[in-house]
Image (cartoon, rainbow, N blue to C red):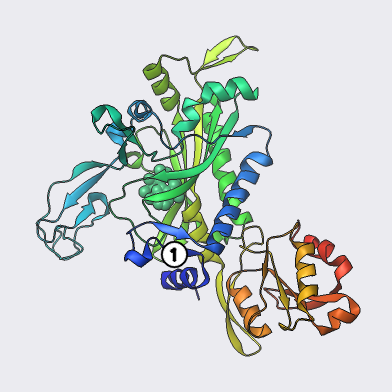
């Protein structure tokens, strides 16, 4: 049976993936802290993206731009004027809602406040989602700066720097992973919509007449990435935006959507941003943000295809898709069938007992595996309960050191999904684990 959100929220809290932020102070609505397992898994999600977008390609380079930068960027990009959500206030209970999230009541056709059912709502007004702060000691209009609401503008303002230093030419891309901040009016659904989150964004610069081709290419490529990492294809779809849904910069957008417990929701937007951003920054800065093609003697502003994914939201989708319950030896178990590339730990090393005689060998085995795989080490509780715990946090392999190991220098490898066990000489262990995990 598909898991509910409560299953994932409970697992994340109990096992140390994700904690509500500032919990000891009663929480801080809409931000979350990533615990010992969450930090590993989120890093793996980001590494998997980086590997496919940068490491495995010859046409993409990386960037890590500042979160806090000149407000001129956001004036030129259009975010100061346009990065808004329509907001209504309920005059009765004072709650605030996104107007585009409210549906007319099927009974009376009127819009009701989802909290108190009142129909006394204000007109919609534009609410800018960027967090404002002040830079330096004086808090006046001249010191206003914004936390970036997307990583993307960093790619555009560094276009010339990257072009000149990387020796790339269109079609080529700049990839960036990092935190973004949006003052969301209605955060919720756990880490689906938070005010601080992480994004993984590629800006792919192409000759304008090739934009349509590359847009299709990136839609296929990005959908395939989620499937390759274990999300069943029937839980994914590509949905193209209607005209009125398009962002101010977009000539076409398709979303990769995932079947969340409440319905389809976006994981990633793939947009044809045209030459909007480069031209806007060129006009505002006076710099020529163009590419000169020596072969044709032509100067042009590239079009940009942008696959923009959320790392934190995607991590939640991987957890939901992997969460399974089954029965082993007549006992119910919860197992996270995560791909080994994104599981927090790849291997758990478990001495059968805590006896002093086994621990030194178990630590020796751990030391052999650590350079190759992220390992957990656990010597508490019965071995059965430790297997259940590793299943529940998605560890693909468990290596058990028992009393025979002291004699035969061999250990048992247990597979998470099949629960099959095989005996392997310690001398072959690293090779066997690498082989099973395709490392
Ligand atoms: P939505 O329609 O859900 O608000 P968006 O279309 O504004 O999202 P984009 O600007 O396209 O989102 O951002 C790219 C990706 O960044 C999204 O697909 C999502 O995965 C992630 N993302 C955006 N906003 C948030 C948020 N508030 N919390 C978590 N992830 C987010």
Q: What element carries label 1?
A: strand
Left or right for 423, reference 201: right
Residue at 41% over, 59% down? 32
Instruction: Please identify the residue farthest to the bottom as the structure is shown.
Output: 330
Decide: is 405 above or below 210.
Answer: below
Residue 417 visible? The answer is yes
Residue 130, image x and y in percent?
32, 40
Left or right for 420, reference 192: right
> Picture quarter containing residue 229?
bottom right
Q: How crowded is mark 1: few (under 14 residues within 10 Å), some or many (20 or more)?
A: many
Decide: is 92 above or below 152.
Answer: below
Left or right for 120, reference 63: left
Query: Relative to the observer, which residue lies in front, 88 or 46?
Result: 46
Residue 425, image x and y in percent?
88, 72
Residue at 48% over, 54% down? 312
Which corner quadrant holds the C terminus? bottom right
Query: Relative to the observer, which residue lies in front, 174 or 253?
Result: 174
Residue 208 visible? The answer is no
Name the residue beneath numbered marker 1. Answer: 19
Left or right for 18, reference 145: right
Query: Relative to the observer, which residue lies in front, 288 or 359?
Result: 359
Decide: is 100 above or below 161.
Answer: below
Residue 219, image x and y in percent?
54, 43
> Picture quarter containing residue 340?
bottom right
Residue 134, image x and y in percent?
30, 35
> Picture quarter containing residue 321?
bottom right
Residue at 74% over, 84% down? 355
């Amino acid at each position: 049976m598909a898991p509910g959100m409560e299953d994932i929220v409970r697992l994340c809290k109990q096992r140390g993936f994700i904690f509500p932020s500032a919990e000891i102070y009663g929480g801080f609505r809409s931000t979350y802290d990533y615990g010992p397992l969450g930090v590993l898994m989120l890093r793996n999600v980001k590494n998997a993206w980086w590997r496919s977008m940068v490491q495995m390609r010859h046409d993409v380079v990386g960037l890590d731009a500042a979160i806090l930068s000149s407000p001129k960027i956001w004036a030129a990009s259009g975010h100061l004027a346009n990065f808004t959500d329509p907001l209504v206030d309920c005059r009765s209970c004072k709650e605030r809602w996104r107007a585009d999230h409210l549906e007319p009541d099927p009974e009376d056709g009127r819009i009701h406040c989802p909290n108190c059912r009142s129909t006394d709502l204000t007109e919609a007004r534009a609410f800018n989602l960027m967090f404002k702060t002040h830079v330096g000691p004086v808090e006046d209009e001249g010191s206003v700066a914004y936390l970036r609401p997307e990583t993307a503008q960093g790619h555009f303002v560094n276009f010339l720097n990257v072009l000149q230093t990387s020796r790339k030419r269109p079609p080529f891309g700049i990839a960036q992973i990092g935190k973004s901040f949006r003052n969301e009016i209605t955060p919720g659904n756990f880490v689906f919509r938070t005010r601080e989150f992480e994004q993984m964004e590629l800006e792919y610069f192409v000759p304008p007449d090739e934009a349509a081709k590359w847009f299709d290419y990136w839609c296929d490529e990005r959908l395939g990435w989620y499937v390759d990492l274990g999300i069943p294809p029937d839980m994914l779809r590509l949905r193209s935006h209607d005209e009125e849904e398009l962002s101010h910069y977009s000539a076409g957008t398709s979303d990769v959507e995932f079947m969340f417990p409440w319905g389809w929701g976006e994981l990633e937007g793939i947009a044809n941003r045209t030459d909007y951003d480069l031209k806007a920054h060129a006009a505002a800065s006076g710099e020529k943000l163009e590419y000169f093609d020596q072969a044709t003697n032509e100067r042009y502003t590239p079009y940009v295809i942008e696959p923009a994914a959320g790392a934190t939201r995607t991590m939640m989708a991987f957890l939901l898709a992997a969460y399974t319950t089954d029965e082993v030896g007549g006992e119910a178990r919860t197992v996270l069938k995560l791909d080994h590339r994104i599981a927090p730990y790849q291997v758990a090393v478990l001495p059968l007992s805590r006896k002093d005689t086994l621990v030194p060998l178990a630590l020796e085995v751990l030391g052999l595996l650590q350079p190759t795989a992220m390992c957990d080490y656990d010597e508490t509780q019965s071995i059965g309960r430790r297997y259940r715990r590793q299943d529940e946090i998605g560890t693909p392999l468990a290596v058990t050191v028992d009393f025979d190991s002291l004699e035969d220098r061999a250990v048992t490898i247990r597979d998470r999904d099949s629960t099959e066990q095989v005996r392997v000489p310690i001398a072959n262990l690293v090779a066997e684990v690498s082989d099973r995990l395709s490392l």
